[in-house]
Every structure is written in C-alpha cells, then in structure tokens.
Image: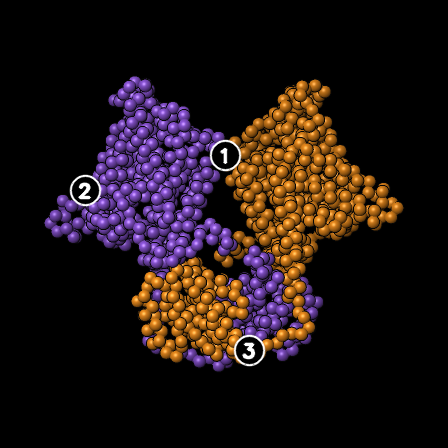
Chain colours: A purple, B orange
Amino acid sequence: MDYLKRFLVGKPLKSAQNDDHKLSKFAALAMLSSDALSSVAYGTEQIVLVLVTLSTAAIWYSLPIALGVIILLISLTLSYRQIIHAYPHGGGAYVVSSENLGKNFGLISGGSLLIDYMLTVAVSVSAGAEAITSAIPALYEHQVAISVTIVLLIMLMNLRGMRESASILMFPVYCFIAIITLLILVGVFKIATGILPYHATSHVGAVVPGIGIALILRAFSSGSASLTGVEAISNAVPFFKQPRAKNAAATLTMMATILGFFFVGITFLNYWLGIVPEKSVTVLSQVASGVFGHNILFYIFQFATAMILAVAANTGFSAFPMLSYNLAKDKYMPHMYMERGDRLGFSNGIMTLAFGAIFLLFIFQGSTERLIPLYSIGVFIPFALSQTGMVVHWKKNAGKKWFGKSIANMIGAFISYAIIVILFAFRIGDIWPFFIIMPILLYIFYRIHEHYVRVAEQLRLRDEVDEHEFSGNTVIVLVGNVTQVDIGAINYARSIGDHVIAMHVATDENKTKEEEIRKEFSEHFPDVRLSVVHSSYRSIVGPVVRYVDLVSKNAMKHNYTTTVLVPSFVPNRRWQQILHNQTSLRIRYYLSWREHIVVANYSYHLKK
Amino acid sequence: MDYLKRFLVGKPLKSAQNDDHKLSKFAALAMLSSDALSSVAYGTEQIVLVLVTLSTAAIWYSLPIALGVIILLISLTLSYRQIIHAYPHGGGAYVVSSENLGKNFGLISGGSLLIDYMLTVAVSVSAGAEAITSAIPALYEHQVAISVTIVLLIMLMNLRGMRESASILMFPVYCFIAIITLLILVGVFKIATGILPYHATSHVGAVVPGIGIALILRAFSSGSASLTGVEAISNAVPFFKQPRAKNAAATLTMMATILGFFFVGITFLNYWLGIVPEKSVTVLSQVASGVFGHNILFYIFQFATAMILAVAANTGFSAFPMLSYNLAKDKYMPHMYMERGDRLGFSNGIMTLAFGAIFLLFIFQGSTERLIPLYSIGVFIPFALSQTGMVVHWKKNAGKKWFGKSIANMIGAFISYAIIVILFAFRIGDIWPFFIIMPILLYIFYRIHEHYVRVAEQLRLRDEVDEHEFSGNTVIVLVGNVTQVDIGAINYARSIGDHVIAMHVATDENKTKEEEIRKEFSEHFPDVRLSVVHSSYRSIVGPVVRYVDLVSKNAMKHNYTTTVLVPSFVPNRRWQQILHNQTSLRIRYYLSWREHIVVANYSYHLKK
C-alpha cells in the first residue's frame, strides 16, 4: 500500500516548502480563467438547445440572448473588480457573505459553492468527454467511463500537488485561446470572402410562431451558465504579484474581454452556419468542422477543447478543498478537511470532490444539458449573496461615497437575483434537488458546529485537576489457541499488571477443543488463571465485552484500573494482514467504546 | 450503524439453531432445480443467436442441435446419479476432483466454480432483467440498474438467512414449471388445431448455403449452457430425507426430464413460429406472445420467468459461500470466509459473490449473450474433472466391476471434454479471460495456503516456554492540546507504568502554541516529563514513531517494556466519531506495526 501510495502520490513535502509562488498576470490568466473560458465550449449550445425545442427557426434569437449574456458579463466584471479591491486577501463568497450578511448567508454561499464545485467538475469533464466523442464517434457509448477516468486522473494529479505543474496548465489554456481566436477569425474571413455561405435557419428578425418570453428567459438562463468561473480571480488575489489588487483587476478585465469575444463569435458563427444541435456531436464541434473543414485542424481543435475543460475541472480541485478548509476551521465541517496530506494538498477535500463529481456523473449519465441548470442555480446564489454583501460592506465602510461605490454591485446583485427568479420560475423541474440538498447541508453544518463547541467546552481543563492515585492494575489477556503469541503477551501483562487473567471464548460447537486448551494452558502457564467463557452465538465479541465489564466493575471497587490485552500477530508482509486478526480488530473496536477500560494491542512479529 | 444492520439483517441466531431441515423430493426439486430449469429462459435463444449470424433460414438447425443437447443432458444425468450414490455426503466438483485427481485438479475445479457462481448470478439476473424489459420495453435502458438492484436484494435476503424462506422459493419454481408446461401444451394444441400457422423461416432439411460444422458446434456449445445447474443436486445430498442417495437420484431424474421436455418444446415452438432474435425482446417472450397472444397471461409468463431467474441467482448464494468455506477450511482462502455472520450465513462469501456479480454486470453491461460462453467454460471444466475423478474413483474402489460402474461417467467426461474443446476452438475470443483468471486464482490459493502453513509452524508452542520477568514498564502518553482527556490518561499511565513520559508533536507552523502547551502542561502536571518533538512535515505520525522507537530501545536496555498510550474520546453519539480521532487512529495503526511496543487506547467518554 505504501509503495503504491508513494508511486501514485509522490514523496512527502516539508511544510516550509509551502512558500508562495506569486503569479504574473500572464500566468494568472492561464491559472484562473480556464473555468470561465472553457464554458464557451457548451454556452452557445445550451442556448440553442432550449430554442430548438420550439423550432429550428428560433435559432436567430441566440444573437440577442448572447447580447444579454454579455451585458450580464460586463456588470459582473465591474462588480467583481469592486470585490477585488475591497478584499485583497481573497474575497470568496463565503467570506464576503459571512462578514456582511451574517453566518447564515455565509453558510448558504459556502454550501452552494461546495455543491457547485462538484458540478463544475462534472460539467467540465462531461463536456470534455463530449468534445472527445464528437471527434471520435466510436467512443460515444463510453462517455461516462471517459468522464470518470478524467476525474480520477485529475484527482491523482491534485493528490500529488499541483505546484510543479502550474506552468503545464498554461499550455492548454493559451492553446485554447489561440485556436478559438483562429476559429473566429477564419470564420469571419471566410464569410467576408464568401467562401462560407449563409445557411441560417431563418433571418434575424423573422417572427417565429409560438415564441414567448418564457422560452427566451429559459434560453437566457442556460446561456448565463457560461459566466460561472468569473468569480475565480476574486478568490485568488493573494496569489498575485504586487500590486495585487490592481493586477487581479486587470486580469479579470482581460479575461472578461476574451470570454465575451469568444461567446459572441461562436454564437454568430453558429447562427450563420445554421447549425442545429445533434445528439452525439457538440455544436462547437459542428461549428469547427464547418469553418475548418474535417481535417487535422478540426482534431487539434477538439483536443484543445477537451484539454481546457480538464483544466477547468481542475479549478474545482483547488477551490473546493480550500473552501472546505475554511469551513472546517470555522468548525462547520469535520476537522479532517483541515489536514494536509503528504504533498501539502488537502487530501480529504480532494477526494470528497472527486467522488462527489463521479456520483453526479453517474446520476446524470454524463449529460451536460441536465447538469447545467443545477450548476447555474448553485453559482448565482453565492454571486447574488456576495454582491449584496458588498453593498452592505460599502454602506458600513465607505461613508457618504457608499452609493457610488456600490452601484456596480447593486446592478450585479440585481441581475443575479433576476436569474435566480428566472431559474426558479422556468427551470424548477431541473433545479428542485438543490432546494432539498441545501437545507440538509445547512442542518449538517450547524449540527457539526454545535458538536465541536460542546466538545471543546467539556474538554477544557478546570482549575482543580483530579489527580487520582490507583492502587493497581488488572490485565485481561485474550487467548485463542495457545501459541507463541500468548507467551509474549502474558510476559508483558505481568510487567504492567498486578493481577493477570487469561480469557478464552469457547463456542458451543467444539467441546473437545475447550478441554484441550485448558490442558495446554495450565501446562505452559501454571500460575495464570484461565477463565473460559461460553458463547451460544458464533460471535465472540459479545461474551468478551460482558466478561470484561464484569472484571472492570470489580477492579473499580478495589481502585484498580483494567486493561484488556489483545494479542495479534504481524505477518511478514503487509498483504498477509488480510488473512489474519479479523477477530482481534473487531474486539478492539467494540471494546474501545467501553468506559473505564483501556484496550492494548500486543503484536507478535512473524519472521517468515 | 448497528440499528441499520439489525433492521436489514435481523436479530442474531444461536448456533444451535443451525439444525437440519431435511428436504422432501418435492421441496428439493424446487430448491435445487431453479438454476437448471431457468436456463430454458435463454437456452434456445443462445442457439438461434449463433445460427442467425449466417441467415434466418438456418434456424431449423436448432432442432437437431437441441437433440444433441438432450443427449448430453441424459449422459450427464446418468453420470451425476453415479456421483450421488458414491458421495452421499455431498460430492461437489471440488471434493470429487481433490480426492481422486489430487489437489491441483481440485483447486482448478474449485476456482472454476467460484468464478462460475458469480457468472450464474450475473447471467440469471441479467436474463431476469431481460424478461422484465421484454414485457415493459420502457425499462430497456435501465437493464443494468435493474440487475444490480436484484443482486443487492438477493444479497440482503441471504445475509438475513434463507432458512425461513425455503418454502417461499417453491412458489416461483412450481409457477414457472406450470406456466412453461401450459405454454408448450397450448402451443402444440393450437398447432394441431391449425390455429397457429406454420411460419418457419425454412423447412427442416433445407440446405442453407454457407452452413458448416464450425457454426453448428458454436451453436451447440451455446445451447449446452442450458445444462449448467444440473450438478446442483449432487452437492446437496446431505440435505435430503432418508434414503438420501435414492431420493436425490430420483429428484435428479425428475428434473432432467422436465428440463429436456421444456428445452425441446420451446425450441420447437420457436422454429414453428419462425421467431428471429430481436435486440430488446427475448426469444422466449416472443414465443409466449405468439402462443398466448399479448394479454394478461403473457405478463404473468414474463413475471414467472423473471422470478425463477431470481431464484436461480439465489442458488449461487448458497453454493458460493459453502464452497469458499470449504476452501478456507483447507487453508486455500482467507479464514474470514469461515466466519458465520449473525444470522448463520457466511456473510463474507455472500458479499464477495454479490460484488463480484455486480462487477461482471458492469463489465458485460448486463448482456446475457456475452456472459454465456464464459459461463459454459467455467461449468464444463469442473464437470469434466469430476467425471474423470469418478472414473478414477471406481477404478480404485469398485474392483473388477469398475468399468461397468464408470461407463456413464466416461461418456459424461468425454462429452464435457468435447465441449471444452469446441469452446476452445470456436469461442476463444469470448473465453480467453477465463485462462488468465484461473492461473492467477490458483497462484493466490497456493500463496495463501503456504502462508497459513508457515504461520501455524511459527506459532506452535515449543516445549521450553520463554518466561521472562521484566523489571518495569515505560508509558508514553501522547498529548495534543492539554485537556480533560489527558488527566485521565496520565492517571491511568501511572497505574501501569513505573516511568511515565508525556509527548507532544509540534509542527513548524505554530511556535507560540508550543510554548502555551509547555506552560499549561507543567502547570497541571508538574511531576510528569513532557517531551516536545518537532515535525517539519504536517504528518505527526513519523515523529511519533521515531521517538517511540528511541524510548523503547532505551527501555529494553533496562529490561523495561514500552507502552504507548493514545488518548481519544468517545463522543456521545456514534456518528460524531467521524468528527474526531482521525489522527489517533492513524498513529495507532502505524505503531501497531512496531515490534516490542504495546499500543494502548485510553478513551474518555463525553457526556453531552
């Protein structure tokens, strides 16, 4: 096991090696924008998928809807620039909401984000798998398997620690930026030169019978999923080079500009080419093969898309463990999320995220389309809450200028609430699980918190320390068959105990064996008392616990402590462990729940 | 956890409750024939599936092939009647091969059967799911999910113990016998009265271009899968009423007659109706709707088929744990397969089987067709070996009459080998995994055996017992923050130790905390030495182990024993356990591998 772990995870790192590698704008853009940028891989498709439920003629509406998304993007960008300047130490939604709106809203933000990071991973990875299967249709059947494999690979990379690989991540991101830019430029050039003929399913402005505000809003809410990931930079301000806030804000603007350009460009090309969503080929891949033709460039394009989506999934793997660390530090999640693994990553957070995402992939059978609405609600709730928090923040801290400072946040909050309302009104059939999971999550947060507070209180030392002097110690040694192990165990028991009892559990099935053990024992240990306890069930745990309780009660009367010594043997090789000691393990487990009993493990080492 | 277990698994049973409920012939037929009888649900289909790869006109060949299967059935039946009389204590292939052909062949039989029982479960359950989805096509997509659910349900039933439910199992089996008999009778009647017109794809005797011996043998080998399960009765002789062997043999003959009648009847109806296999509807279900029409009787028919297939899967759940018990008793499998659970079932065997079958269902995506060839090779190898073993048995025990006695076994063996050769020659593409898994399994068996033998040797008491008198005991108490827990732990340590050391691991990150702990500790325990060990890694396990090794080495020099006392606290409710003690657990685990160190667990009980 250990060798395997070393091989997969790598050598342990010193804590001091956790020094900061600060990010330049160029590196930061690569590190932090993959989530946002990669969403153009499915953003347009999500809008068109809703529109074609009416008719393919409705596709032209994707253009004004894309415009709406761009307006939303601009307002969110301005709003997050404000957060960057106000929280240069990193203003995640959990922190901003907790500080300004109180713990309740903070936990709602935090809980939403935990779910959302799982969805980020699931959505990105399944969109990545779709990019692969669009290029290689033979793999279409294995989409879920591909997705799960990618998640496991990313998990492993993160358990190894991502430090060394930061620069590796830049490659796919810039690759993607380059190839999408190329796609749009080549597309526009070919349109301008008339090489790419106009194939739109209907002209802009055409009246499509049956179109209504509900459909448009549904499509808009789907398209707004492209904006998830915009907040990433605001959480990561401390990792920027000085001047941090300024660099971060500039990076955010840069990212938003690229994202907007890509989104509009792809939506336009899709409209021009009259592309209708297909089951097994993504819209983006159809656009690419329309513009590039079905040649090597197309395959490079699909590969670059899959790569950036994998990198985007990876963002979840840095954000989720960090957030769960913060929640654990505030005692709302189990302490184990605070422990760093050998390679300085928060291993428990990393694994929780991976298995959560895999679970979602199985539930939703890797369908991006069905994951998107949940993803949107999970992201716009913390968006809305942190913007609202910012308004409160300015009100408290900015004096008279608060209104001016908070105007961007107000608009951001307003749009976010609007999207939540739209999702609630038109997508409730898709997003209802969120409203079941969230209250449960909040309940768990509070239960955990309450528990930790109560425990700390009970454990605190009071001034008078109850120093108690015991008169002696009783040791019970569990004996199975009489073997070499027992010799060592009894010798040890004598060194710590004033009174040593050996105990054997006999099952009904084997009377002769009991006699044999009595005889053998008295032969080898004439001066140790052997108690034989009978069991009518096969389980020997029950009788042991009952007998030990009895002895311990008696010991306490005499001001003695009680120790149960469970002998076990350590085989020569680790794998052999599974062939032995199942019963000792179980006995130790059950005895560890008894009060006033110390359970000790004597291990005998086999040499061969 | 415990409540959940009680609810799902039921109350523990006494060992003495394990008395035998002997079976009448009527009950035995129901209990032991489900595996064999249920295979008519897919037997004909497997033959036809192979034939139609050439052309639908080839379907008429299924009639002579069915005849071949019947001959095989008769010879196997005669052969197994011999085994029943020779091994009235139950003659599984493992026992018969081990005794007569040696351990190697015994283990090959045993290993094949272990795999085969997993395949039995997987095949039966997926065929059952197909029966359901043939009736309700809307469920077709969820075939794997249905199969997995059925496996889990059967597993749970078996963990509860099947004793009470023996009579419940009779219902589906007799139901199935009744409805298949009805199907054949109604079919023949309707044919005789001309209601059911002749629709055969081609006449018997028609020459189909391209037909060859290879195809016929492939089809024959697929059809012979129907004969799996014939051996079940021979394993279960001890469960029959007296005279055991005679009753068992009579039951076997009865079962074989019914099986043969069903197989021929269904194959004939299939030919007459000219049914061609379809992707989502089974052949048997097409026969049924052809004969009965698509009415309520058809649905009852499908339901009865699904039920008997579930019962057939259940057979695996009694056979697999029993076989793994026998292998564990002979030290070829881990001891844990010998432990009976609370309800007298061999829980570990039951769970291994269930998860193995689920694994197969996922790998083969619940496709009966792809599972069948593997299933056949896994069953005909032990068939062949046990028949061969019987020939050897007669040679040894029957004196001059050996030839007469063994003639049935010789024919049985010959046919079984022939089928193995056919499978090897024409289905190697499907059965190759078997020849990879078997050697691995054999290797594991031998490694386990060798290990157990070696351990037993090392543990055996020699005549001189090394009774050693230690001079005293050193106790190391691990201290985190100074809390109430530590008071109790140090009091206890004093009761067993002549020399008590407290130990704290400080991580680099927190220098001030270290000072705080030193101060607090010396305030409360002025007379106990506190050793603070530094860790440059976050892991505190490494430093603890190194320090403990040092102390123990020193203690040994002074003829002292060493105990490490790890305090932990027991929360008021079980679920809260997950919120605590992760580190103590890890430390205890790693220390338990050190020689000459006893690890003791002091537990402090929280009241709130």
Looking at the image, the residue that sits furthest to the left is A400
Q: Which residue is mark 3?
A: B470
Mark 3 is surrounded, within 10 Å at the Cα level, by few (under 14), some (14 to 19) or many (20 or more) other residues, namely: some
Query: Residue A410, position in %: x, y?
Result: 19, 43
Q: Which mark is residue B86?
A: none
What secondary structure is marked by label 2? helix
Up/down of A495 relative to B456, above or below: below
Q: Nearer the viewer, mark 3 or mark 1?
A: 3
Question: Foreground residue, A285 or A469?
Answer: A285
**Disc 1 packing (10 Å; few <14; some 14–19; many ≥20):** few
Q: Which sits in the foreground, A172 or B301? A: A172
Q: Residue A506 is drawn in which quadrant? A: bottom right
How many badges with numbers are in the image? Answer: 3
The spot of residue B603 in percent (x, y) is 45, 68
What residue is drawn where x is 30% and y is 67%? Answer: B512
Q: Is residue B278 left or right of residue A320?
A: right
Q: Position of residue B503 (x, y in %)?
A: 41, 70
Q: Kindly identify which chain the residue marked by label 2 belongs to.
A: A
Helix, strand or loop at mark 3: loop
Callout 3 amino acid: Phe
The chain that hosts pointer 1 is B
Residue picked out by circle 1: B141
Going 67% across and 27% down the picture, which residue do you hit?
B215
Would residue B320 be visible to someone looking at this image? Answer: no
Tag nearer the camera, 2 or 3: 3
In the image shown, does A268 or A238 lie closer to the viewer?
A: A238
Q: x%, y% of residue A435?
A: 35, 45
